[in-house]
């Protein structure tokens, strides 16, 4: 009886879990974004855990993990180091990703935009990321010399590639430092990941029958009236 009740309550309070990959070149602002997300969430849920000071974030060697609850979804964010020699481990996480945020430094010189574009193209072409929703995050919009998200999308050819692939996608201007656009980013990728459904049957006829991912493409994020807490 106890175990029946226990199972019932476990089921009742269990959360859907999604895994979000946060990738991009080194110094794009991925970890700042992760930490800023925690800070914003802590403000909404006083007493919950938060992030480290934004001016003390070292380059990531390996992986940072953030766990966030958005409504009934437990969001696990994997922030992987972007230095060239660390990018070879990214692919180990593709098979379990329900969504991908690609962070770009909007103040990059042309050769770094080229490098970011080539890296992003590789991700879009990877079979294990087929159908996974992508959000292109144009970070550091607070800087004077930043390119606009429209310019960056043109440079990267992102929207056109996603449209050809019928992939859920969004271009998001952001400043991880000030927090502008951070919550919209989290909410959109969580909605898109939930809309995609479970990974394994994703390529099956059932997924296709459910309308695929096109219904979520460039969807406006919902209002800010839902619960979001640090677990
Ligand atoms: N002006 C400005 N600077 C930012 C912003 N986001 C991050 N930075 C700065 O960019 C630098 C790199 O930030 P990180 O968050 O460590 O970058 P990362 O993408 O995690 O880098 P790796 O861990 O090496 O892959 C730091 O000096 C941040 O303070 C932003 O929105 N605006
Ligand atoms: Mg980092």
Image (spheres, helix red, strand yellow):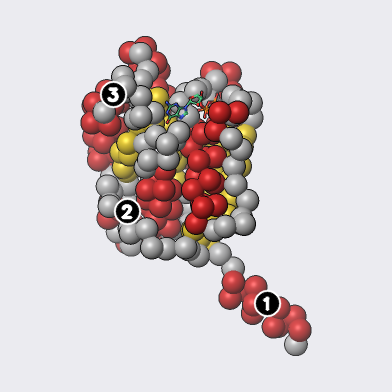
Spatial CA span between label 1 and label 3:
52 Å
Image height of 172 relative to 59, above or below = below
Question: Which of disc 3 and disc 1 is earlier in sequence?
Answer: 1
Image height of 115 relative to 70, above or below = above
* Quarter where residue 66 is shown: top right
Residue 117 visible, this orientation:
no
Number of other residues with Cα within 10 Å of mark 1, as a class: few under 14, some 14 to 19, many 20 or more? few
| Residue identified by numbered label 2 | 221
The reply to whether the C-beta atoms of the residues labelled 1 and 3 are less than 8 Å apart is no
Q: From this viewpoint, which residue is outermost toward the bottom?
A: 1
Number of other residues with Cα within 10 Å of mark 3, as a class: few under 14, some 14 to 19, many 20 or more? some
Mark 3: secondary structure: loop
Q: Nearer the viewer, mark 2 or mark 1?
A: 2
Q: At 33% across and 13% down in the image, what residue appears?
A: 110
Question: Which of disc 1 and disc 2 is earlier in sequence?
Answer: 1
Viewer-proximal residue among 221 and 124 = 221
Image location of residue 50, percent across then percent down:
60, 47
Q: At 39% across and 45% down in the image, what residue appears?
A: 185
Number of other residues with Cα within 10 Å of mark 2, as a class: few under 14, some 14 to 19, many 20 or more? some
Q: At 65% across and 73% down in the image, what residue appears?
A: 10
| Residue identified by numbered label 1 | 7
Question: Which of disc 3 and disc 2 is earlier in sequence?
Answer: 3
Mark 1: secondary structure: helix
Determine whether, in the image, residue 186 is placed left or right of residue 164: right
| Residue identified by numbered label 3 | 147
Residue 14 visible, this orientation:
yes
Q: At 27% across and 55% down in the image, what residue appears?
A: 215
Spatial CA span between label 2 and label 1:
34 Å
Mark 2: secondary structure: loop
Viewer-proximal residue among 109 and 55 = 55
């Amino acid at each position: 009886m106890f175990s029946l009740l226990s199972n019932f309550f476990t089921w009742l309070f269990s959360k859907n879990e999604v895994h979000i990959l946060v990738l991009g070149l080194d110094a794009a602002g991925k970890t700042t974004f992760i930490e800023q997300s925690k800070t914003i969430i802590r403000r909404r849920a006083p007493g919950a855990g938060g992030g480290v000071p934004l001016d003390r974030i070292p380059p990531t060697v390996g992986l940072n993990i953030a766990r966030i609850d958005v409504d009934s979804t437990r969001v696990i964010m994997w922030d992987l180091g972007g230095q060239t020699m660390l990018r070879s481990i990214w692919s180990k996480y593709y098979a379990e990703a329900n969504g991908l945020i690609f962070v770009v430094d909007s103040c990059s010189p042309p050769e770094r935009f080229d490098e970011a574009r080539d890296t992003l193209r590789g991700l879009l072409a990877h079979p294990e990321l087929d159908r996974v929703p992508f959000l292109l995050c144009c970070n550091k919009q607070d800087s004077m010399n930043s390119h606009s998200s429209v310019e960056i999308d043109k440079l990267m050819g992102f929207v056109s590639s996603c449209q050809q692939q019928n992939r859920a996608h969004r271009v998001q201007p952001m400043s991880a430092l000030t927090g502008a656009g951070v919550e919209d980013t989290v909410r959109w990728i969580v909605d898109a990941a939930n809309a995609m459904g479970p990974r394994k049957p994703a390529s099956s006829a059932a997924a296709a029958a459910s309308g695929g991912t096109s219904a979520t493409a460039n969807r406006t994020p919902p209002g800010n009236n839902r619960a979001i807490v640090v677990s």
